[in-house]
Structures are given as C-alpha cells and as structure tokens.
Image (tube, rainbow, N blue to C red):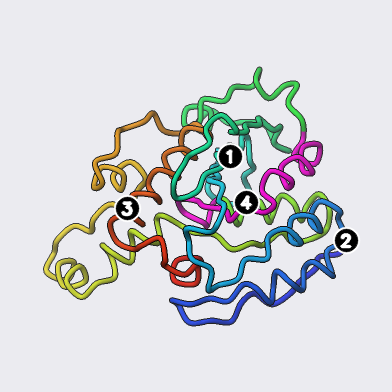
Amino acid sequence: MILMRRSLPKASSKRPDWLPYLTARVDDARHAGLQRYYSRSLFAPETPIANIPMVALDMETTGLDERRHAIVSIGLVPFDMQRIRLAERRYWVVKPPRPLNRDSVTFHHITHSEIADAPDLREILDELLDALAGRLIVVHYRNIERHFLNTAVNARIGEEFKFPVIDTMELEARLHRRTYLSRLKRRLGGKPVSIRLHNSRGRYGLPAYQSHHAVIDSLATAELLQAQVARHYSLETPLADIWI
C-alpha cells in the first residue's frame, strides 16, 4: 500500500495551527470516509471552545506499542461544554490481527469469545469516521488514540489518519508537571502529581468510575474536560489554546 505523508502543523507548543493540514486533506484524501471526515472537521483555531461540538474517544488495546499491538474496542461519547450526549454513545469491539494474550485480557477484560465474531476495523471504518466527522476529538493521552488509529487505518487503506485533539492529560500536565514549582518539587525529591485519568478526575471532585471500558473512559474524559474548562479556562477560550 502507498503511505501518504503530509507535514503536520508547524506551531509553537501553545498554538498549533491544524487548519491548513485539515484543508489540504480534504483534497488529497482518497478514501471516501476520510474525505467526509476532513471536509466536516475544518476547525478554525480562533473558534471559542463553547462553539465546538466534540466527541470523547477511548480505545482499549492489546498493549502500548502501536507497531506490535492492536485495537480491541473503541468507545465514543459526543458532548459539548453544556451537555454530554450519553444516549448517542457508540461502542465497537473489533478483532485484532494477532491473538489476544493473557496480560491484555486481564487489563481490558475483552475475551477471546467476544472477538471471535467481531469485525475487523476495516468493516466499521466508514461508520467510525462518520461518527467522528464534524466533532473535535477529545482524549486522555493522545499517544494511544491518535497513534493507534493512524497506524490501524494506514495498514488497511494505505492512507494516514491524523487529526487534532484536545488531550485532557496534556492539560493536566501543563498545570501540574511543567510549572516552575512542580519542577522545583521534583528536583527536591518530591513525587510528580499523577495525571492519570482517575487521579485527574479526583482533583475536580468527579466520581470514580470503573476504568478500562472504552465507553466509560470516554464519558470520564468528557466530564474531565468540562471540569478543566470551568476551573482553569472559559467558554471563550480559543481552540488554539488547548488543542494539540
């Protein structure tokens, strides 16, 4: 398969500009689902976050290396800054190209019997892309969702699938890992503040949910972003300040 490569946004660490990349992909994407996604997802960086429809995305995988491991489930929860549309949630179990191992089953609780008749990602790709189109994707740790989806899509259709996200873990890192005081504390031997999803939610008084289910973790991520914006940003915060 031909691997398409286009430069990603050139930007400072605080203000990436995805719009030129998204616009270019409308013209050069060959797969119809990708064309629909990019044509409906042309988010301008100056748009206030209050005006952006979003979708929280979480995936369970067989490991952490997208080159050796695979996606086994995908969950989506549409939302915005006022409302979480849990009734519109989506969930897929997909068959990985390699057998499950004991460690991954223990982690995500998806068994061999559940994936026996599950579709390959290729079979649900159009449905997935249409569910994402027109909404900004929100994740907790972009190096899983963005890297795994790009690798999986590229392996099946020979095209890259790269996209902007709001990463709630990145927002917590800015607050608790990269300030002068947090760096000083670590130099003096203090433990870094945890920015995992469960611990991050606890700082905002959000309830504890069972983890490692793609829909539940998507819901948890959506609620976390709403809390982060309410406490540290505003509804007028431009998208460019928080996407990556």
Mark-to-mark CA distance, 2 and 4: 20 Å
Name the mark nearer the viewer: 2 or 4: 2
Residue 33 located within the stretch drawn in magenta: no
| Picture layout, residue 152 above or below residue 11 | above
Q: Amino acid at mark 4?
A: Phe
**Mark 2, other Cα within 10 Å: few <14 / some 14–19 / many ≥20:** some
The stretch in magenta equals 120-144
Q: Residue at x 68, y 56 (%)?
A: 150
Which badge, 3 or 1, is on the more N-terminal residue? Answer: 1
Between 43 and 110, which is closer to the camera in this rendering? 43
Q: Position of residue 17 (x, y in %)?
A: 58, 76
Q: Amino acid at mark 1?
A: Leu
Q: Quadrant of residue 118?
A: top right
Mark-to-mark CA distance, 3 and 2: 38 Å
Q: Amino acid at mark 2?
A: Arg
Q: Quadrant of residue 113?
A: top right
**Mark 1, other Cα within 10 Å: few <14 / some 14–19 / many ≥20:** many
| Picture layout, residue 239 above or below residue 219 | below
Q: Which residue is mark 2?
A: 30
Instruction: Give the main secondary structure of the magenta stretch.
Output: helix
Q: Position of residue 193 (x, y in %)?
A: 23, 56
Q: Which residue is mark 4?
A: 148
**Mark 4, other Cα within 10 Å: few <14 / some 14–19 / many ≥20:** many
Q: Amino acid at mark 3?
A: Ile
> Helix, strand, or loop for circle 4?
helix
Mark-to-mark CA distance, 3 and 1: 21 Å
> Helix, strand, or loop for circle 2?
loop
Which badge, 3 or 2, is on the more N-terminal residue? Answer: 2
